[in-house]
Image (spheres, helix red, strand yellow):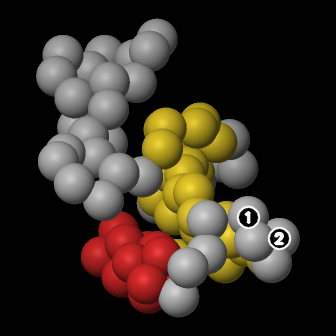
Amino acid sequence: MTIYSVYDKTTKESTTHYSLSSAKKHMKELIKQGHEVSGSKTKVYSNGDWEPCGEITLTGSNKVFMANTRQTKAGY
């Protein structure tokens, strides 16, 4: 499962989303209101382990290459 976190630097509040589209939508709404926003992705495994997967970008691809895995191309 991948968790998407949106952090509003203006009000210092964070929200958690479970889909990339809802996280991006929330980020765009906050930016329209004049807030400074950042977002990050976290991959959570069934055994409780987690890996940070980088920042959420509003334009372009959000796929990243995970180090120390059998992954051969960017997919998360």
Q: What is the x, y in percent for residue 61?
A: 19, 45
Query: Which residue sits at x=80%, y=78%?
Result: 11
Asked if residue 45 can be seen in this view, the reply is no
SS of the residue under disc 2: loop
Label 2 – label 1 distance at C-alpha: 5 Å
**Mark 2 = which residue?**
12
Q: What is the x, y in percent for residue 76?
A: 31, 42
SS of the residue under disc 1: loop
For residue 63, which quarter of the picture? top left
Query: Which residue sits at x=52%, y=63%?
Result: 4
Asked if residue 57 can be seen in this view, the reply is yes
- The vertical placement of 50 against 28, above or below, is above
The image shows a total of numbered marks equal to 2
* Pointer 1 local density, CA inside 10 Å: few below 14, some 14–19, many at least 20: few
Q: Amino acid at mark 1?
A: Lys
Q: Is residue 3 left or right of residue 72?
A: right
Q: Is residue 53 left or right of residue 22?
A: right
Q: Residue furthest top?
A: 68
Q: Amino acid at mark 2?
A: Lys
Whether pointer 2 and pointer 1 mark residues with C-beta atoms closer than 8 Å, the reply is yes
Given residues 47 and 29, the one toward you in this image is 29
* Pointer 2 local density, CA inside 10 Å: few below 14, some 14–19, many at least 20: few
- The vertical placement of 5 against 18, above or below, is above
- The vertical placement of 59 against 52, above or below, is below
Q: Is residue 4 left or right of residue 64?
A: right
Query: Which residue sits at x=61%, y=75%?
Result: 35
Query: Which residue sits at x=22%, y=54%?
Result: 59
- The vertical placement of 27 against 74, above or below, is below
Q: Residue furthest right?
A: 12
Q: What is the x, y in percent for residue 49?
A: 68, 41
**Mark 1 = which residue?**
9
